[in-house]
Amino acid sequence: MVKTAERTTLWAGLEGTSNPAQISTTYGNLKAMTLAYKVKGSSLQGNEALKNDIINGLDWMYHNRYNPSIATYGNWWEWEIGTPLQLNDIVTLLYHDLTPGEIGNNWPHFLQGKDSGGQELKVYLNMSFVFDPERREFMDMQIIGTRSCYPPGPAKMPDLTDCVFTSGIVLREDGKVDLYSGLGDCETGRITIDYPFAGHGLLV
């Protein structure tokens, strides 16, 4: 990790500003550091110097690479999914070590959109993950549904047209699951998806 005051990147080889995958990779490195700091039994668990390096790195990334005022470039997936997934884990794990301002800066910023008239839209997704309470580690986080996966329909407010609110899943005899959600805070819908917790046992 580059720690000098005049740094232009946090890691050598990730200084570019044309490939957003470098942003996701940088946050992936910060997540690895976060796991080393938080996971029980790690040789660096609770290491204050490591924690400070992580927080300083998050601050540098916010001011220089990933914030709402920075124009996006390259693959949209990195901005809207790749980097937010990394930040979700980091902020969740470090929640009690961060100030309110640091939490606000580092919750994902790009899970939002705009309609054809430029009006901002809220974006809520169906997501699944596995949490190990002993190691405080998230695993297999994935997006399992979006508003476009469901039949079209109305929304209670204009900025809720791209929102799904997960209600629950029901196991099916064919091994798949029915995923139920609120749509646009106005109606309900159902889609059939692959079981999202494969390898982690069945829901009780």
Image: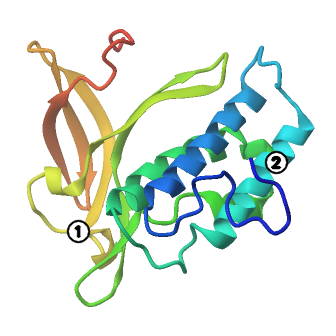
Q: Is residue 79 left or right of residue 184?
A: right
x, y percent for residue 146? 25, 51
Check residue 53 in the rendering and tell me which mark sits there, or answer none: 2
Q: CA distance from mark 1 to mark 2?
A: 43 Å
Which secondary structure lies at badge 2? helix
Specify the quadrant that holds the C terminus: top left
From the viewer's perspective, tell me whether residue 191 is left or right of residue 67. Answer: left
Q: Disc 1 or 2, which lies upstream in sequence?
A: 2
Say which residue appears at 85% left-offset and 66% top-offset: 5
Residue name at image x 81 percent, y 69 percent = 6
Residue 78 is situated, as x and y percent measured from the top left of the image, at 40, 56
User: Foreground: 67 or 1?
Assistant: 1
**Residue depicted at 66% across the width and 51% down the height:** 11
Q: Is residue 168 above or below residue 172?
A: below
Badge number at residue 24: none
Compare residues 9 and 52 and report the one nearer the observer. Answer: 9
Q: Residue at x 53, y 78 (%)?
A: 70
State the image quarter where residue 62 is shown. bottom right
Badge 1 element: loop
Kindly identify the amino acid type of the residue bearing the numbered disc 2. Asp
Tell me: 90 left or right of 174: right
**Which image quadrant is residue 80 in?**
bottom left
Crowd rating for badge 2 (residues with CA inside 10 Å; few <14, some 14–19, many 20+): some
Residue 155 tag number = 1
